[in-house]
Image (spheres, rainbow, N blue to C red):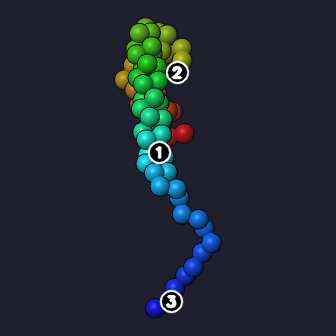
Amino acid sequence: MAQILTNVPAAPHGASLRHAIATFFGTFSSAIRANREVQELYALSDRQLAELGLKREEVAQYVYKRSFDA
């Protein structure tokens, strides 16, 4: 059996936990911003949405795709 050795230092204890927590809160704050934007767009009239090139039924998909597929 071959053995591969590297000179890459191990991550400090707890670094992966900190990364996971930071990722969680980053995603959570993105979801809050996206939800706020959806609510703002839903508050517009159909005519105002059309001026933006949107239909009411497309609002949520538009915002979440833009927010999370970046």
Q: Please tell me whether mark 2 sits on a helix, a strand or a loop.
A: loop
Q: Please tell me whether mark 3 sits on a helix, a strand or a loop.
A: loop
Pointer 2: what residue? Answer: 53
Q: Is residue 12 above or below residue 39?
A: below
The answer to whether residue 52 is left or right of residue 31 is right
Q: Nearer the viewer, mark 2 or mark 1?
A: 1
- Callout 1 amino acid: Arg
What label does residue 18 carry, if any?
Answer: 1
- Residue 25 shows up from this direction: yes
Residue 32 placement: quadrant: top left
Query: What residue sits 49% from the left and 16% below the top?
Result: 50
- Callout 3 amino acid: Ala
Residue 43 placement: quadrant: top left
- Residue 62 shows up from this direction: no
Where in the figure is residue 29, as x and y percent of width and height? 45, 29
Q: Is residue 66 above or below residue 15?
A: above
Pointer 3: what residue? Answer: 2
Residue at the far right: name it: 7
Q: Earlier in the sequence, mark 2 or mark 1?
A: 1
Q: Earlier in the sequence, mark 1 or mark 3?
A: 3
Q: Foreground: 54 or 64?
A: 64
Q: Is residue 7 above or below residue 53?
A: below
Query: What residue sits 57% from the left and 79% below the top?
Result: 5
Q: Foreground: 17 or 25?
A: 17
Q: Foreground: 33 or 60?
A: 33
